[in-house]
Image: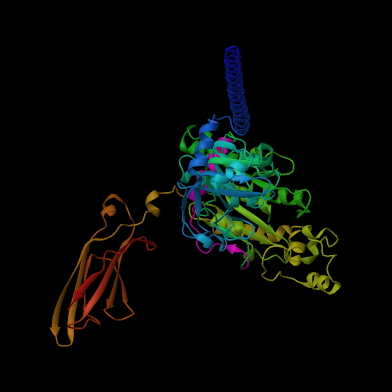
Amino acid sequence: MRASVAGCKMSVGALLNGLLVSVVAALLWKYSKLSEHAALLEEELHMTQQSQEVSQARIDYHVALQALQEHGTRMVCSGKMHTDRICRFDYLCYCSEAEEFVFFHSNSSVMLPNLGSRRFQPALLDLSSVEDHNTQYFNFLELPAAALKFMPKPVFVPDVTLILNRFNPDNLMHVFHDDLLPAFYTMKQYSDLDDEARLVFMEGWSEGPHFDLYRLLSSKQPLLKEQLRNFGKLMCFTKSYVGLSKMTTWYQYGFVQPQGPKANILVSGNEIRQFARALMEKMNITRTEEADKDAGSAEDEKENKKKDEYIVVFSRSTTRLILNEAELIMALAQEFQMRVITVSLEEQSFPSITQVISGASMLVSMHGAQLVTSLFLPRGATVVELFPFAVNPEQYTPYKTLASLPGMDLHYISWRNVKEENTVTHPDRPWEQGGIAHLEKEEQERILASKDIPRHLCCRNPEWLFRIYQDTLVDIPSFLEVLKEGMKTKPSLKKTKITSTVHPGRVREPQCQTSVQTTNEAKLTVSWQIPWNLKYLKVREVKYEVWIQEQGENTYMPYILPQQNYTFSENIKPFTTYLVWVRCIFNKNLLGPFADVLMCRT
């Protein structure tokens, strides 16, 4: 009996000990889970803080991480080829260790276009507006979203971002032509790329001397590639656009063929002037004519304008100097009876230079990147570009092309130094500043003897560099003669009428009637109504173009007609089917679309 009681007591004790151990184990397990959860929360808080270091926008880190893990990356692109493609991404990530973008796949991922291996032929898209340059290609690596478990915790960028390459941020022409203008109008294409969007530059350059100009595009500080590693090993952009529109570029730099205007220029002076106006507003600059437009009568205004007219001369302090700059300034002042103001990129702020240029009647400069500032000139101004000895103005025309764009309303004149004795060369400088001492003696002698640089490709042609970095003593008599002759052809600036660039619509109700006169003779009468938009326009000249093609033939007969109906008999055969197209033409060069083709049987 006692043994039974003792055994029972031992069993109860063991049971109590077991229960106690279980309770302690459960508490320890719960504590470890709570600790683990607390550590996870602490890590998420830390990652949220890191994300907010990138942007002031708030982000729910847990929600963002869950979205990336469950839905992966999503991509939808516009454009058929890598040269015209821009892609929108949700949750595109960047690994700073690998220096690669990463697309995370899940069952909910979207990839349009889904190109497969064609994505590498040669790339998904160009990161720069410079077309098909092999240093500007964009692509990404692919991973399953499950791989995120084994990777560093991502930092999320909650801003809408525009990811691009600057092509050459040290050169003002490249800054405007390749970066600012394309970025400005790319941001206009997408409503969420607004003033709060973030620009991310992936080319690897440092800020460069013109970084303040990039800051004008957004209220948020742009990010450089080298800065991304400061925010973590894996960075994910919640919403981003990758690539740049090329529609605003007008010049190709000679990578495939010698440099010159693009074959298909899609931008006009109107868009460039709108861009210039927007930048000037950001720099708090008001054009003089806008500030004074309400003052006084038209006669007073004309008189005041004449008094206020001035010429701007760009002064350079290190290379490509005008050796007799003071003499040139005096000659300009005497010839045009105007003030002459010098500006210098080395000595003045860009906004102060823009303020001066925006009111100038003429801009004079040696060939160089600073001439891109001519886009800030008022309508009716003159651009005068000076070229050193042996440099043919017809072969280097970025600023002539800009000035000549429809709607820029600028007059362009070039002067070329043709006197070798008026040039100072620098053969002993570094090659990138035109030095040729590193070349074989025979090649040096050939370059020194040359009187005209042959057409060449970009970018390190030693003869081009040698000649373009010369200093020049401007021959004042020949300069003034070129200027006088050039000013004779300057068109008078008339207020631009929007109807002067409006194209006609389709002609309406086109129809044809036929009749057979004899076995060898027939007539074809074609008539139509005027385009719908013509009744709202005052157009100087309206004509109609008619094409007639015998069915089965490859050639057609074109006619330009002043009236809305016409009977054709010449070359019209009986019992034959003719295809007829009709369209309207405004002012000789503004073509409308063809109406639907007519099939006319005689």
Number of numbered labels in the structure image: 0
Q: In the rendering, at what x and y percent does residue 41 appear?
A: 59, 27
The residue depicted at 18 percent of the width and 83 percent of the height is 574
Q: From what the image shows, is residue 399 above or below residue 513?
A: above
Q: Quadrant of the C terminus?
A: bottom left
Q: Is residue 512 left or right of residue 227?
A: left
Q: Is residue 271 magenta?
A: yes
Q: In the rendering, at what x and y percent does residue 476 appear?
A: 72, 57
Q: In the rendering, at what x and y percent does residue 60 appear?
A: 53, 30
Please state which of residues 590 and 482 is positioned toward the viewer in this rendering: 590
Please state which of residues 287 and 236 is positioned toward the viewer in this rendering: 236
Q: Is residue 158 in view from this perspective?
A: yes
The residue depicted at 80 percent of the width and 69 percent of the height is 448
Q: From what the image shows, is residue 187 above or below residue 383?
A: above
Displayed quadrant of residue 478: bottom right
Q: In the rendering, at what x and y percent does residue 538 appear?
A: 32, 52
Q: Is residue 540 magenta?
A: no
